[in-house]
Amino acid sequence: MPTDKSTNPTPTENIALAQAKASVVTTRSIPRWVFPVAAAVIFLVLAPMGAAASLGIVTTLTAILFYVIVAQGWNLLGGYGGYLNFGAAIFVGSGAYMAAWLNDSFDWPVWATLIPGGIAAVVVSIVIGYATLRLRSHYFAIFTLVLTFLALTVVKNTPALGGAIGLFVRVDRGLDSRQIGMLFFYLMFGLAILATVVAYLVENSNFGYALRAISEDEPAAQVLGVKTVSVKLRALVLGAALGGIAGSAWAFWTGYIEPTGAFSVKIALDIVLVCVIGGLGSWLGPLIGSFIVVGLEQILRVTLPGLDLFGFELPAETNRLILGVILIVFALFIRRGVIGLLKKRRGRAIAV
């Protein structure tokens, strides 16, 4: 397998990137500039919400922004690169535990733990990347799911990290609940903008075209000169950094973390759901998908419990069933998500 020894593309690699660009040429039913404007409008509308909306709405919007950050990171390899994985919770949990440990042991504030949390997730992603990125298709997806349970087991048996009991995270005690809500809303808000900008830049770079080449036909891309392992590893590391930073903020926002919650398969599945519904391989997809999935979850969580259907009371878990059905519908019939409905795609797969 070739290794990446230089930063400048070789002539052969330039051919591969040109092929990748050709394979994803799109004609949109609406102008290209509309998507960045739509994202800007979404963030402009959200900006005053932290101060103006009720605490319940602020909490829901903070959860949406958290999912935007993690999903934008996941989408780099999972969407653009076509490598479905269930390891998002590993990076979120790594960042969360690093932040909680620094706070518990050295009383570090949330701002000081963001970068260490991202670094912890990057280190974990490098180990995972070298272990898994030569796998393909469902083998890679299954292995990342197994690693999520392995991470949970390791943390649960590590006394320094609180073991099965977990760790409490302390926020400034001088703040009331409203101020804490605003603090974490605007923290997630800023990080969500950062993650969205990173995804936009990746999509419109040679790095993004290389990821698309891998998604279209990895063996052909490799033959044409794309350093596939290196590109996939960079995507995994960048996505992990975003997940780890989000996890650091999430640890302080929740105030308490424990292994089952930090490395929850629910987080991993929800991130996949967000990207599939919003649109895989699109920087706007995770932004729209987060609003749809988290908003729908909140509505179903409130309306379904206690509701009678043909004389049977629906259990609280019914919302997960409904979301699962929605995921199947999108996977089968709307494969390019909500964003795919807004543009027509034409092009060709890479051929040699």
Image (cartoon, grey):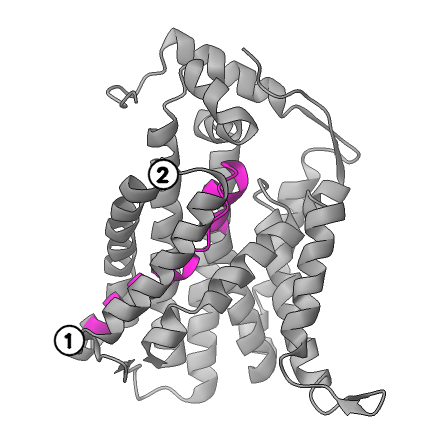
Q: Nearer the viewer, mark 1 or mark 2?
A: 2
Which of disc 2 and disc 1 is earlier in sequence? 2
Q: Amino acid at mark 2?
A: Leu
Q: Between 292 and 176, which is closer to the camera in this rendering?
A: 292
Q: Between 252 and 214, which is closer to the camera in this rendering?
A: 214
User: Badge 1, how many Cα within 10 Å: few under 14, some, many 20+?
Assistant: few
Q: Residue at x 51, y 70 (%)?
A: 62
Residue 121 appears left or right of 293: left
Q: Amino acid at mark 1?
A: Ala
Q: Which mark is residue 133?
A: 2
Q: Residue at x 44, y 87 (%)?
A: 177
201 up-or-down from 179: above or below: above
Q: Is residue 108 visible?
A: no
Q: SS class of the residue under badge 2?
A: loop
Q: Position of residue 117 (x, y in %)?
A: 27, 60
Q: SS class of the residue under badge 1?
A: helix
User: Badge 2, how many Cα within 10 Å: few under 14, some, many 20+?
Assistant: some
Residue 352 picture quarter: top right
Residues under labels 1 and 2: Cα distance? 30 Å
Q: Position of residue 145 (x, y in %)?
A: 42, 57
Residue 346 appears left or right of 276: right
Magenta span: predominant SS is helix
Q: Position of residue 60 (x, y in %)?
A: 57, 74
- Magenta stretch containing residue 34, yes or no? no
Q: From which residue to which does the magenta span run?
A: 72-101
Q: Between 102 and 231, which is closer to the camera in this rendering?
A: 231
Q: Position of residue 46 (x, y in %)?
A: 60, 64
Q: Residue at x 62, y 42 (%)?
A: 36
179 up-or-down from 222: above or below: below
Q: Is residue 285 visible?
A: yes
| Residue of label 1 | 160
Residue 236 picture quarter: top left
